[in-house]
């Protein structure tokens, strides 16, 4: 046998590439994973951003990966441990903190009576809708207009599960799915802080504001994805890189090989089929199939090349909305930050800075016109509060997801990065007096940095905007929604495919099913 010939070559060792590789290797395939970076993990890794200080590179909370996937790949046995699970969310404002209820029964704590009652109804219904949508995320999308029995059965199965919702919930789903989240929240609640925090979850990682149509869809997506997760809001010991390390271990234990610092320059096409890859070093590797977790724009237009695709397909890929809106901030701190609203308690939960619907919409307004938000929205955790090993003894790390930071801003990021950092620090200082003086190093990643450092075109959270027009049977584009490229033997398995981004592993696992189905 040719020593460098593999059954499958997987491009990229982000969590989806590794998940896909693990499933393929477990099915007996000879698998090679090629990662351009010097470490595995992609946007779900852990990095040392200042000497002795480590933080999750982009994703910092694990809350979407299904429990069955963690178990099937035996990630606990491969070293995955949690520093915190079921972390609470606190919405912070100048006036105090509101603990966002995580379930229907805990609603009464901090909310007024009317909002507590409304929350119980709202949460119960949203949970039912999310659970009904959940099977959609785990399914390989059927082909549009297909007469094949497998596609028909998938569609029928999904429709039957939705039908189980009953008439009232079904009607509500149809009513709200395309709506803006502001209207939905205004229908239910009075508290500006509660509405701000719930709207934040709807727009996080997207190019939407609370008044944008489709923002209820993104909220439902997040709830649906989280509804099958092992634990809501968890932080692995060692950051998200520990999850990808466990996935890499699972893939290797099943026989997969992993090569780091091995950027793929081209997918080799022979007789209209993907037949291997050409590395940046000039080395050629042969394979029965190639599975790419790189984003769709990179995969189709750079690695494969438009010459192998028809013009309509190239146009669809070129028109994908891929520009990110979300930045990441890491701070190395001399001491534990103390947030006024938490009244001296250690920040062991998730803190959301989105004080009202108006604040969220105003932050979005800046971005619409090519500026970073003057009053940015933040999702903050202090990972060292539950995992002290991420910093030298007694020191701390603050990790913040920051919105809105458009991929392109008027005047360019180069001259404005310091100004944006200063704006975020001001926001934090207002809530945690003294924090600024405690900063010994800071790293701010704009979407352009995410593009360059993690090789994601546009630096987008989902590799391509997650919206009704880029979802399910048309994700990333029609003609490639079943993880198969128009070129035989080339598959996609990253966040750009169904069901989108977030550390879920489903794109990787669904793609492996398709590869195995083709070979069967
Ligand atoms: C700022 C930010 C914060 C986020 N926070 C969260 C969060 O808290 N929780 C959550 O669930 N999700 C979060 N996300 C989303 C989540 O990080 C991503 O959706 C998910 O990690 C994507 O995983 P992936 O494996 O599909 O792709 P990636 O992680 O992008 O991995 C793709 C891999 O392919 C490699 N690659 C690309 N091109 C080549 C090539 N030519 N040759 C070899 N290798 C190549 C890349 O180097 C990379 O390692 C966040 C995203 C961002 C941007």
Image: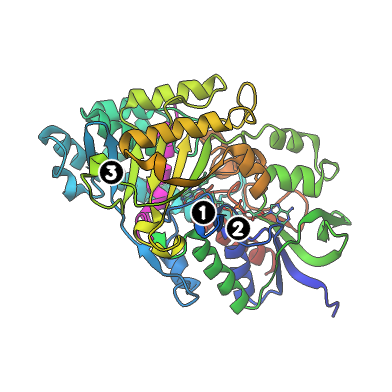
Residue at the location (78% across, 49% down)? 303
Q: Is tag 2's residue or tag 1's residue first in the polypeptide sequence?
A: 2
Callout 1 secondary element: helix
**Depicted 72 relative to depicted 380: above or below:** below
Quadrant assignment, res 233: bottom left
Residue at the location (80% across, 49% down)? 304
Task: Please state the extent of the stretch shown in magenta in the rendering.
Answer: 213-234
Q: Is tag 3's residue or tag 1's residue first in the polypeptide sequence?
A: 3
Disc 3 under 8 Å from ligand 1? The reply is: no
Disc 2 under 8 Å from ligand 1? The reply is: yes
Could you tell me residue 478's position as x and y percent?
65, 40
Could you tell me residue 423's position as x and y percent?
46, 30
Give the crowd class for mark 3: few <14, some 14-19, many >=20 residues within 10 Å: many
Mark 3 or 2, closer to the camera: 3
User: Are circles 2 and 1 on residues that touch, CB within 8 Å?
Assistant: no
Q: Is tag 3's residue or tag 2's residue first in the polypeptide sequence?
A: 2
Q: Mark 1 points at which residue?
A: 154
Q: Is residue 361 magenta?
A: no
Q: Mark 2 points at which residue?
A: 14
Could you tell me residue 194's position as x and y percent?
26, 34
- Side of 465 where 86 appears, left or right: left
């Amino acid at each position: 046998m040719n020593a460098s010939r593999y059954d499958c070559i997987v491009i990229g060792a982000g969590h989806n590439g590794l998940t896909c590789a693990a499933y393929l290797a477990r099915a007996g395939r000879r698998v090679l994973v090629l990662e351009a970076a010097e470490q595995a993990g992609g946007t779900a890794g852990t990095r040392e951003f200042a000497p002795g200080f480590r933080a999750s590179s982009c994703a910092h909370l694990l809350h979407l990966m299904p429990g069955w996937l963690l178990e099937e790949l035996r990630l606990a046995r491969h070293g995955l441990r949690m520093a915190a699970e079921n972390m609470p969310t606190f919405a912070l404002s100048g006036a105090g903190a509101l603990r966002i209820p995580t379930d229907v029964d805990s609603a009464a704590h901090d909310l007024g009576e009317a909002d507590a009652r409304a929350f119980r109804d709202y949460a119960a219904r949203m949970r039912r809708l999310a659970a009904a949508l959940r099977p959609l995320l785990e399914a390989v999308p059927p082909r549009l207009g297909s007469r094949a029995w497998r596609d028909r059965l998938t569609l029928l199965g999904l429709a039957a599960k939705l039908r189980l919702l009953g008439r009232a919930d079904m009607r509500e789903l149809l009513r709200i799915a395309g709506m803006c989240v502001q209207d939905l929240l205004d229908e239910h609640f009075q508290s500006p802080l509660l509405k701000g925090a719930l709207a934040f979850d709807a727009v996080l990682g997207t190019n939407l504001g609370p008044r944008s149509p489709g923002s209820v869809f993104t909220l439902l997506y997040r709830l649906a994805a989280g509804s099958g997760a092992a634990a809501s809001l968890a932080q692995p010991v060692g950051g998200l890189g520990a999850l990808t390390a466990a996935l890499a271990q699972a893939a290797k234990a099943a026989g997969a090989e992993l090569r780091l610092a091995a950027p793929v320059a081209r997918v080799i096409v022979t007789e209209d089929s993907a037949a291997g890859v050409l590395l940046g070093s000039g080395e050629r590797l042969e394979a029965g199939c190639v599975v790419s977790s790189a984003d769709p724009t990179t995969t189709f237009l750079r690695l494969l090349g438009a010459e192998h695709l028809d013009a309509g397909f190239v146009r669809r890929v070129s028109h994908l909305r891929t520009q990110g809106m979300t930045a990441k901030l890491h701070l190395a701190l001399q001491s534990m930050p103390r947030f006024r609203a938490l009244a001296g308690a250690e920040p062991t939960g998730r803190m959301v800075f989105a004080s009202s619907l108006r604040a969220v919409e105003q932050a979005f307004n800046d971005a619409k016109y090519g500026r970073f938000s003057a009053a940015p929205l933040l999702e903050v955790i202090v990972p060292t509060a539950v995992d002290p090993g991420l910093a030298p003894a007694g020191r701390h790390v603050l990790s913040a997801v920051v919105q809105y930071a458009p991929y392109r801003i008027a005047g360019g990021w180069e001259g404005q990065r310091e100004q944006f950092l200063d704006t975020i620090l001001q926001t934090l200082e207002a809530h945690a007096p003294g924090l600024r003086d405690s900063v010994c190093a800071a790293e701010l990643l704009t979407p352009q940095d995410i593009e360059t450092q993690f090789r994601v075109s546009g630096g987008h959270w989902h590799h391509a905007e997650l919206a009704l027009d880029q979802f399910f049977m048309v994700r990333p584009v029609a003609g490639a929604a079943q993880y198969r490229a128009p070129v035989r033997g080339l598959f996609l398995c990253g966040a750009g495919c169904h069901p989108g981004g977030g550390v879920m592993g489903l794109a990787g696992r669904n793609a492996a099913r398709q590869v195995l189905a083709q070979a069967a």
